[in-house]
Amino acid sequence: MEFTSCSDNRSILINITLIMLIVYSENDSQDNDLSWMKVENKVTPNEEQIKGFLEGDADTPIHMVNLLKFKDKAEYEDGRETDLTGEQAYEIYSTEVQAHIERVGGQLIFSGEVNRLMLGEVEDLWDKIAIVRYPGLMAMVEMTSDPAYLESAIHRIAGLEGQLNIETKVS
């Protein structure tokens, strides 16, 4: 992927640094003990998270960092039989969501498979990372409320064991 401006590269570095901070823990020093930090993948946000998101600055661009963990086998809520893995079901969503993101003025900034954990410790490493830029939080709300998006999201739900979805802003 080619980035066209220094600002884009800075955003990527900020987001990657954030990801590293989330998974970082150093057990040798009490000063750096982050054992209190609970990491729990989810498929949908809770009410408090939604409320906090909606209280944000509607006009400031945001970058959503997605740390994705896939199911071994896709499980569709409508009970359909499938031989798809969770990653394959999510890939259907990923392909379809591209148009939804672009329709609201967003852009996929980065997507990549997780190879290994370079620093720190985590019980279960994520499978993939994606960073999406939205022109503001209302663009994301508009996208995720669209019935066409909700049809695509069926594959997301079927494929994900859970994820962390982290809102970031360039400073």
Image (cartoon, rainbow, N blue to C red):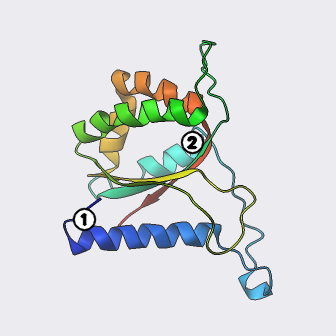
Task: Determine which residue is flagged by label 2.
Answer: 45
Residues 29 and 51: in front is 29
Which label lies toward us, 1 or 2? 1
Q: Counting other residues with Cα less than 10 Å from the Cα at mark 1, is it few (<14), some (14-19), or many (20 or more)?
A: few
Residues 12 and 135: in front is 12
Q: Position of residue 26 (x, y in %)?
A: 73, 80
Residues 142 and 131: in front is 131
Can you tell which quarter of the image residue 39 is in?
bottom right
Q: Position of residue 22 (x, y in %)?
A: 60, 67
- Residue 163 position (above or below residue 63): above
- Residue 53 position (above or below residue 119): above
Q: Residue at x 50, y 46 (%)?
A: 51
Q: Is residue 37 visible?
A: yes
Quadrant including the N terminus:
bottom left
Of callouts 1 and 2, the N-terminal one:
1
Q: Position of residue 135 (x, y in %)?
A: 26, 52
Q: Residue at x 60, y 20 (%)?
A: 76
Q: Is residue 56 visible?
A: no
- Residue 107 position (above or below residue 156): below
- Residue 113 position (above or below residue 142): below
- Dot 1 amino acid type: Phe
Callouts 1 and 2 close, C-beta under 8 Å = no
Residues 145 and 78: in front is 78
* Left or right, 132 with reference to 31: left
Secondary element under disc 2, as helix, strand or loop, is loop
Can you tell which quarter of the image residue 43 is in?
top right
Q: Counting other residues with Cα less than 10 Å from the Cα at mark 2, is it few (<14), some (14-19), or many (20 or more)?
A: few
Quadrant including the C terminus:
bottom left
- Dot 2 amino acid type: Pro
Task: Determine which residue is flagged by label 1.
Answer: 3
Q: Residue at x 44, y 67 (%)?
A: 15
